[in-house]
Structure formats: C-alpha cells, structure tokens
Image (cartoon, rainbow, N blue to C red):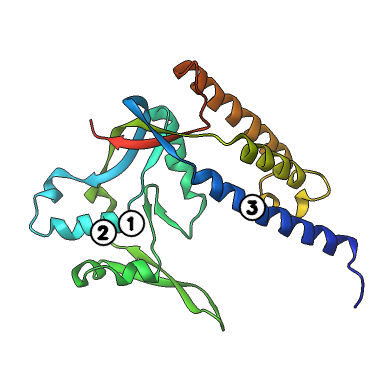
C-alpha cells in the first residue's frame, strides 16, 4: 500500500474533524430548552398568505395546500433586515421560484392532491445512473395570488449551555479555518472565504452575547428558540 501524500492526509483530517463537528452540533441542538415565564418580543417573520379575494374562492383550499408545500418564511430583527434576506434567497435559482416560494422535489410533489398537482410543471435538474432523473417541480399559480404578511416573533424558550461542547466546537472550527485545512473544508466548498467565516463568527458571538446581557443578569444561554405569534 502506497503512503498517502500531503493532500490525501489533509483531506482525511478534514473529514475526521467535520464528522466530529457534526456530532457536536447535533448534541448542542439537543440540549434542554428552558421555558420563559413571559415571552420576549424578538424580531419579525415574513411569509406569504392568500390574497383576500383568492381566500374567498371555493377552491381556496387548493392554493392553501400549494402554499403549505412551497411557501417559506424569513426571520429578521427588523423589517428592513427581512427585506434584504428575502431578496438574497434568490441566489439558488434551482431551489427558489421567487423569494419566499420554493420549487419542490418529487417526494413533496407526490404528497399533493390531484387538484394541486395540476398547477405544477417539472424539469430535469440532472440525471445519473444511480438516481435516474432528478426533477424539480415549479408552480404555475401567479405570484399575485399571494401577498406577504409580517408577524411578530417571540422568544418563548432559551437553550441551556454546555461549555464543554462549545469549547470543543470552537477548537475544531479553528482547525478547519487554519490555512492548512481550510481549502478542503465544507466552508471552502460552499464559497465562503476564510476571512468571511472568521468575521462572521466574531460578529455572531458578539451579537448573541449582547442580547443575553441585555435580557438576563444571572443566567447565560447560547441561543434563542423562537415561536411565531400573529399580530
């Protein structure tokens, strides 16, 4: 067996570190949620709803079914921030039909009723011998059938912290951001630069720390859990 070269060794190391990171991310997400005595106002959601005249139609349930399958919501601290995020999602032309309304795959399409399926067309994304034809389904319902609606977002729970998990994640992520491993990491594969990831990590930590300090004096939590509450 021939010895691994430098690139193969780095790729092997990256796979090992990313696998460990995924385990820790999962463990962090599964930490206990602690309910608050009183919900805290925190940002906004934006999503599509049926236009009033469309909602009064006899077949309105069909369009509601389509909206449930294709609609998506965006969260932001301010309405302006949501507007920016709403437009930014169009970077994935294969996934988004228009901001807040996505194309769906074969599995989601099969779950639709016969009447809802009549409003969809499809195209082939790719084909390979293992998966066969991979399709995306797009809706022919006009965009003006739906209108955007803002709803208030509230913090109803806070997630507990495990400092040991946080420390391990930070150590592993720093390894992936190193000049040696970064070119072979998932961040590089998704086009996120080393400089951007470091800056984002610092800003995100500062923001969450600032929010926690403003709301709580004695206890520290690492992440908000949101629940949508209508106007």
Front residue (pair 108, 138): 108
Real-space CA distance between mark 2 and mark 1, rounded to the nearest whole angstrom: 6 Å
From the viewer's perspective, is residue 198 above or below residue 109? above
The local secondary structure at tag 1 comes to helix
- State yes or no: discs 2 and 1 in contact (Cβ < 8 Å): yes
C-alpha span from label 3 to label 1: 24 Å
Alpha carbon distance from label 3 to label 2 = 30 Å
Q: Secondary structure at mark 3?
A: loop
**x, y percent for residue 158:** 43, 32
Residue 133 vs residue 173: left or right? left
Residue for badge 1:
70
Residue at 45%, 58% (x, y): give it.
95
Quadrant, the C terminus: top left
Using the image, tell me which numbered label, if any, was put on residue 66: 2
The residue closer to the viewer here, 97 or 165, is 165
Q: For the residue carrying disc 1, how many other residues have a C-alpha within 10 Å: few (<14), some (14-19), or many (20+)?
A: many
Using the rendered view, name the quadrant where residue 38 is placed: top left
Instruction: Name the residue beneath numbered marker 3.
Output: 190
The answer, for residue 185, to whether it is visible in the render is no
């Amino acid at each position: 067996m021939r010895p691994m070269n430098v690139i193969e060794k780095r790729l092997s190391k990256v796979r090992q570190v990313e696998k460990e990171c995924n385990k820790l991310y999962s463990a962090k997400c599964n930490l206990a949620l602690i309910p608050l005595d009183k919900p805290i106002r925190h940002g906004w959601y934006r999503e599509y709803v049926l236009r009033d005249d469309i909602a009064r139609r006899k077949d309105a349930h069909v369009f509601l079914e389509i909206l449930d399958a294709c609609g998506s919501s965006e969260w932001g601290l301010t309405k302006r921030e949501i507007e920016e995020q709403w437009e930014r999602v169009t970077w994935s032309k294969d996934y988004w039909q228009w901001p807040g309304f996505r194309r769906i795959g074969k599995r989601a399409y099969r779950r639709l009723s016969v009447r809802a399926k009549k409003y969809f067309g499809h195209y082939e994304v790719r084909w390979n011998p293992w998966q066969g034809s991979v399709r995306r389904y797009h809706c022919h319902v006009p965009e003006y059938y739906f209108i955007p609606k803002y709803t208030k977002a509230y913090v109803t729970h806070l997630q507990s912290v495990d400092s040991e998990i946080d420390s391990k994640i930070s150590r592993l992520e720093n390894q992936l951001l190193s000049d040696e491993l970064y070119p072979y990491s998932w961040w590089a594969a998704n086009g996120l630069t080393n400089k951007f990831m470091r800056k984002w990590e610092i800003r995100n930590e500062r923001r969450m720390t600032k929010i926690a300090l403003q709301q709580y004096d004695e206890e520290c939590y690492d992440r908000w859990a949101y629940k949508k509450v209508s106007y």
